[in-house]
Image (spheres, rainbow, N blue to C red):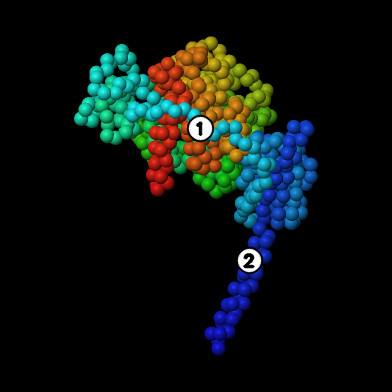
């Protein structure tokens, strides 16, 4: 009898629990966003409905670079960068209508809605979207109408010379870094000649791609440009170690030889520096600002809006990446963007000072009253370059990076210091040109004392005094030219946004991802890059994968492939004249027939890791 009563009581308890769960589920806070059509004033009236939100709570979300004009409901308040928040005046359902820009792509819609309540854990909101009807796509990605028949020695980048059969091919007079020659006889056994380790590796890369069994042929090949790079931004959307290794495998298969590793910016600091633990303990962890809008413990979310995530490489992980890259003849150049784009380090060193009381690594002057708005909507991301503590800080960073490369047994070609997009209004009350002189000479002091070279974006070389410019030229490995035709007198790595920024959308279809401030970029346009048309000492070409619009490794590879193959082709074969009979139709057929299946195989291997 007691057993029956116990079971009855348990049944009743389960019944009431189910009722409570059902009621609770009906009260789960949600967000619903609806895209509005473009009106005569060029703006669109969008609608956001928040359901089951408690009074006095706060809802946060992320949206890229958009001003808003409220029409109905509570205000949307900008915090920093892509972060916005709404203070909820009443419980239940809250509707907001606001004018914003017409939505260029679905990936630009507000995202990562999170409910914040005092004394309770932050809660991500389930979000639904209602978009206007999709427009027809402008083009089919990877499309080609060519009937070119792919030959056995066709691969990307295309080889300079090939002769099928056993007839001897006269060796060209070209011998440069990376040169190699493969001779395959009737027995199918390859013989390789190379002038250096790079050439030997590229020969093996070519052999691995040739169809088996190997048929008689002679291949002679070499790169037109010594620097062939890929820039990976892991700051806005972090890539795991395995994802970085997978990208290095792709780079190696395309004979790229430099990873420009963008690992510190406004949104995160992604490399462990043992003497300055706050850089990663604070600057690589993300959560919502507290109720007083302070980031006291960790940094605010970046563009992807993730909270509670860790986004950095330990010293051992970084060394593993370095060794893995070097085994594939890829050099790694880390970038710490300065003196703008420095919010993560600035905030981390403020946390360091709060913990230790030590102000000797201070990166921003508390007395600085500058008012500015950066390209990515930050108002507090510029170093106070006149402080000696800035150079003490970067001395520690440089020393750690040098040590990590030495411990890994790999070269450190340069440390990239950025130098781009310092907003107008920074350093108010001080001469802007003088600040640039102080900063440039301060960083050169660090580099010269350590016998290392610097690299930077083109902005860093503009507006300098002649003596500072000459000093920079002596220590500079290269400038990334992204916005102009080049700069005379400086070694240039071509990185033009319109041809090499892989984060640009393929076309104007709303369901593409990516930005469009420099136009659209597909594999055909990237293929049209002509290095010989640019000014200056062109030492290389580089593809850039910025990650503000990426949310996964699949997003990253979608934007890379096949656009990055076109950039790799231009880095190895700098013009259509480099390879006999080259054309885009031939190129894209090789991509679809050879490179695409290889990548599909690699994806299967990657997903098993």
Residue 409 visible somewhere in the drawing: no
The residue sitting at 33% across, 17% down in the picture is 176
Tag 2 secondary structure: helix
Seen from the viewer's position, the closer of residues 599 and 164 is 164
In percent of width and height, residue 223 lies at 38, 21
Q: Is residue 372 above or below residue 310?
A: above
Q: Residue at x 34, y 20 (%)?
A: 161
x, y percentage for residue 509? 61, 35
Picture coordinates of residue 384, whole percent (x, y): 59, 28
Residue 248 in the image: above or below residue 432:
below
The image's mark for residue 454 is none
Q: CA distance from mark 1 to mark 2?
A: 51 Å
User: How would you rate the neighbour count of disc 1 (Cα within 10 Å): few for under 14, some for 14-19, many for 20 or more?
Assistant: few
- Residue 284 location, x and y as percent? 52, 41
Return the residue found at the far bottom. 1
Say whether disc 1 or disc 2 marks the residue closer to the N-terminus.
2
Q: Which residue is at 76% across, 35% downward? A: 39
Residue designated by label 1: 143
Residue under numbered circle 2 = 21
Where residue 407 sits, quadrant-wise, is top left
């Amino acid at each position: 009898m007691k057993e029956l009563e116990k079971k009855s009581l348990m049944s009743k308890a389960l019944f009431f629990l189910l009722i409570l769960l059902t009621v609770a589920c009906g009260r789960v806070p949600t967000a619903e966003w609806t895209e509005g059509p473009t009106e005569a004033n060029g703006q669109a009236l969008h609608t956001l409905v928040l359901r089951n939100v408690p009074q006095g709570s706060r809802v946060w979300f992320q949206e890229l670079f958009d001003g808003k004009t409220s029409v109905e409901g509570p205000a949307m308040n900008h915090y920093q960068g892509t972060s916005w928040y709404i203070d909820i005046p009443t419980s239940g359902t809250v509707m907001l209508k606001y004018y914003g820009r017409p939505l260029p792509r679905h990936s630009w819609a507000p995202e990562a809605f999170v409910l914040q309540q005092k004394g309770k854990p932050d809660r991500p909101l389930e979000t639904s979207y209602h978009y206007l009807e999709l427009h027809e796509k402008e083009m089919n990605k990877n499309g080609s109408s060519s009937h070119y028949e792919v030959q056995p020695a066709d691969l990307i980048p295309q080889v300079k010379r090939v002769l099928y059969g056993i007839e001897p091919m006269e060796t060209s007079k070209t011998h440069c870094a990376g040169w190699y020659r493969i001779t395959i006889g009737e027995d199918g056994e390859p013989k390789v000649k190379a002038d250096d380790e790079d050439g030997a590796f590229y020969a093996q890369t070519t052999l691995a791609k040739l169809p088996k069994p190997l048929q008689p042929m002679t291949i002679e090949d070499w790169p037109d440009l010594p620097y062939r790079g890929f820039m990976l931004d892991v700051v806005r959307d972090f890539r795991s170690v395995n994802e970085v290794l997978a990208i290095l495998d792709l780079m190696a298969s395309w004979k790229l030889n430099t990873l420009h590793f963008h690992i510190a910016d406004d949104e995160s600091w992604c490399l462990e520096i043992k003497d300055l633990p706050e850089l990663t303990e604070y600057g690589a962890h993300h959560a919502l600002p507290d109720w007083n809008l302070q980031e006291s413990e960790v940094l605010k979310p970046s563009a992807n809006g993730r909270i509670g995530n860790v986004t950095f490489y330990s010293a051992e992980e970084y060394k593993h990446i370095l060794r893995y890259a070097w085994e594939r003849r890829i050099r790694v150049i880390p970038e710490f963007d300065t003196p703008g784009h420095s919010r993560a380090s600035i905030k981390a060193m403020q946390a360091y000072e709060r913990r230790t009381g030590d102000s000797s690594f201070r990166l921003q002057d508390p007395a600085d009253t500058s008012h500015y708005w950066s390209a990515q909507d930050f108002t507090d991301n510029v170093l106070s370059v006149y402080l000696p503590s800035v150079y003490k800080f970067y001395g520690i960073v440089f020393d750690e990076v040098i040590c990590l490369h030495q411990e890994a047994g790999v070269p450190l070609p340069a440390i990239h210091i950025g130098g781009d997009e310092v907003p107008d209004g920074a350093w108010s009350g001080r001469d802007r040109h003088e600040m640039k002189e102080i900063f440039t000479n301060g960083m050169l002091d660090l580099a010269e004392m350590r016998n290392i070279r610097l690299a930077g974006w083109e902005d860093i070389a503009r507006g300098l005094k002649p003596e500072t410019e000459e000093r920079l030229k002596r220590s500079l490995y290269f400038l990334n030219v992204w916005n102009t035709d080049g700069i005379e007198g400086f070694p240039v790595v071509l990185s033009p946004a319109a041809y090499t920024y892989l984060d640009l959308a393929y076309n104007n279809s709303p369901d593409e991802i990516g930005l469009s401030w420099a136009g659209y970029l597909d594999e055909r346009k990237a293929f049209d890059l002509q290095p010989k048309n640019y000014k200056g000492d062109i030492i290389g070409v580089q593809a850039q994968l910025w990650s503000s619009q990426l949310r996964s490794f699949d997003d990253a590879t979608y934007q890379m492939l096949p656009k990055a193959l076109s950039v790799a082709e231009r880095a190895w074969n700098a013009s259509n004249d480099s390879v006999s009979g080259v054309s885009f139709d031939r190129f894209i057929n090789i991509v679809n027939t050879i490179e695409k299946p290889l990548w599909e195989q690699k994806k299967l291997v990657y997903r098993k890791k």
